Amino acid sequence: MRFLITGGAGFIGSHLAEFLLAQRNEVFILDDLSTGSVRNIRHLKSHEHFHYFFDLIQNERLLAELIDESDIVFHLAAAVGVRLILESPVRTIETNVYGTQRVLEAASKKKKLVFIASTSEVYGKSTQVPFKEDSDLVLGPTVKGRWSYAASKALDEFLALSYWKEKKLPIVIARLFNTVGPRQTGRYGMVLPGFVKQALDGEPITVYGSGQQSRCFCDVDDSIEAIWRLVSTDAAVGEVVNVGSDREISIEGLAHVVKERTRSASPISFISYDKAYEPGFEDMPRRVPSLEKLQRLTNYIPETPLPQIVDRVISYFHKQRDAELVGSAVHREFDATWPAYASNSPDRPYFARRRSF
Ligand code: UDP
């Protein structure tokens, strides 16, 4: 089969591409390299069934061609990460809402199945754990930037469900809960790669707030298994499904696991939310998915234990560092470049292409 992954050079997208290629599928990726990186897909670039396009989703002609070429579209392109959202709110909202709208519009012409990656952020600060897909969403006020991310992804969900209802476009929506693993960067505020980096550098591991807030971390490979099963299940079409682990740990607990697995001497330090993010920042105290629906639809729930996930992340960091020691400056220059290689002009030749459209 043939698949398009928007955001295919991102953390989750690159793992999904690997998974699909391993099953002898044809994979097209479209990525503007805003938060994704060439580094994530460098090992796939020479694969004969892998085709990469570094361009904006606003390039409607390219998007339409790639959707035409594909049997299923995985729409993963989004602005993610709490830090990025606070620093670039306009970009977050526009990327998330307009990007999804364009993908749905183009896919609906050919009635291609679209998988939409949503997020557990949409539950907001609800305290009704575990979160069920039909629970109320509890968002904070619009003056607090964090909630714009949840609102933009909730709008994506409304839009996708409306395309299904009104235009009969088949869609599947997954709310991803704290997906972690190799290739995730701490640059946009994600906690696990941040802690691992700090521990390996011998710097203080920075726990925000009291550290008693909790999350459930899910290995990216488990998330992909769940996503794959969902798009392979007719009963999942038109549904919103939680995807993640339900094994809860406090952030302070996570800091201890990271310290132990890295054998680091780093101290664990506590920083107020105001200092870490912005004055008045609101965090969610607990975030635990109900996995009943996922289990019912796919007969699968993610189970990789946290220490194993953390070890995978640590070993990725070690490999990265080894590669950087011998790596060329060219690669780094390449990865840091955005949006120089992206273009919203349909006439500009795509920076990298394996096929001509
Ligand atoms: N966090 C932290 N130290 C960091 C980065 C994040 O204590 O260096 C906290 C953050 O405040 C939140 C949790 O870890 O309570 C998870 O943060 P992340 O941004 O990874 O995901 P999300 O908030 O979306 O669950």
Image: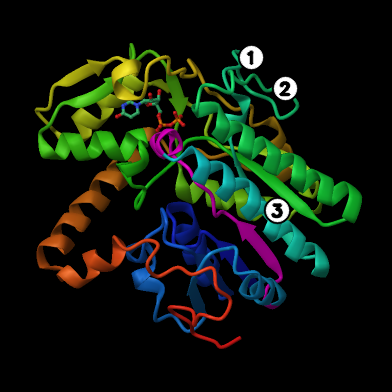
Q: Residue 1: in sight, yes or no? A: no
- Residue at 19% x, 20% y: name it: 268
Circle 1 or circle 3, nearest the eye? 3
Q: Is residue 328 above or below residue 315?
A: below
Residue 237 placement (x, y as % from top left): 79, 50
Q: Which residue is mark 3?
A: 101
Which comes sooner in the sequence, label 3 or label 2?
3
Q: Position of residue 255 (x, y in %)?
A: 27, 25
Pointer 1 and pointer 2: residues touching (CB < 8 Å)? yes
The chosen color scheme is: rainbow
Count all numbered tags in the image, as a single digit: 3
Q: CA distance from mark 3 to mark 2?
A: 25 Å
Crowd band around label 1 with a 10 angstrom C-alpha radius: few (<14), some (14–19), many (20+) = some
Residue that label 1 marks: 128
Q: Earlier in the sequence, mark 1 or mark 2?
A: 1
The residue that appears at 51% across and 80% down in the rendered structure is 348
- The part of the chain drawn in magenta is 69-87
Q: Quadrant where the N terminus lies?
A: bottom right
The amino acid pointed to by label 3 is Gln
In the displayed structure image, the side of residue 134 where residue 31 appears, left or right:
left
**Element at label 3:** helix
Q: Quadrant of residue 338?
A: bottom left
Residue type (three-letter) at the residue carrying disc 2: Ser
Residue found at x 64% / y 70%: 63
Q: Position of residue 200 (x, y in %)?
A: 15, 39
10 Å crowding of disc 2: few (<14), some (14-19), many (20+) = few
**In this view, 231 is above or below 81:** below
Nearest to N terminus: mark 1 or mark 3: 3
Q: Which residue is mark 2?
A: 135
Image: 101 above or below 309: below
Quarter containing the C terminus? bottom right
Which residue is at the front of the view, 99 or 210? 99
